[in-house]
Amino acid sequence: MSEENVSIEDLRSAVENEHRFPTAIRGFDKKAVNTYLKEMEEQYKQSLAEYDEKRVDIIKENENLNEKVELLNARIADLNARLDAKRENDEKIRQAVMSEMSVKTNQLKAEKRDLELKLTETEKQLQDLKADVKESTSGLNGMSEKLQKQLKEQFDACNEMIKTWEAQHVLAVKEIEDQVK
């Protein structure tokens, strides 16, 4: 490099490089090695800065994800609580319905027993009434026969009386006629 084209940065770099690489290693230029090391350091600093930016972004993203996970966990806990409450409510309803059905079933069984007893009593009363009707019918038939017999006897007696009166009438008429003649 010529001294006219040398900038302040080049001079500063040259001064820094002189103190960094104090001895020349065979085959290497001290200035070139110092420049190379400086470039490597700058690349390292740049990579470190990029890494820090990425790390900060990753931390922020991780925090956002953790917040979302917490929200989702809270939502899951809420849904589980609702589900448990619904299950409990469904179980209470089922038990209430079962209890009510049991009560109604017992009532229906009791009503059925009562109706069966009433039916049995009614059937017994019906059989008693049938027996009474049979007995009454046979009594009425017997009475009817007696009545018919008595009526016939009375009619026969009446007919005998009528015949007797007719015979007496005929005799009385004959006697009257005989007396009138």
Image: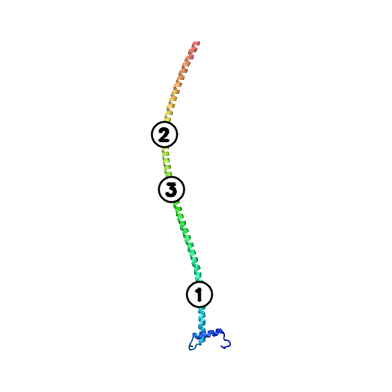
* Of the two numbered discs 3 and 1 in the rendering, the one whose residue sits closer to the viewer: 1
Q: For the residues marked 3 and 1, what is the alpha-carbon distance in whole angstroms?
A: 74 Å
Task: Give the number of callouts.
Answer: 3
The disc placed on residue 132 is 2
Q: Please report whichever mark, 1 or 2, sits nearer to the chain's N-terminal start.
A: 1
User: Label 3 sits on what residue type?
Assistant: Val
- Label 1 secondary element: helix
Q: CA distance from mark 1 to mark 2?
A: 115 Å
For disc 3, the marked residue is: 103
Q: How is the image coloured?
A: rainbow
Characterize the local packing of mark 1: few (<14), some (14-19) or many (20 or more) Cα atoms within 10 angstroms.
Answer: few
Q: What residue is drawn where x is 44% and y is 23%? A: 154
Q: Residue at x 41, y 34 (%)?
A: 132
As drawn, the label of residue 10 is none
Distance CA(mark 2)–CA(mark 3)? 42 Å
- Residue pointed to by mark 1: 52
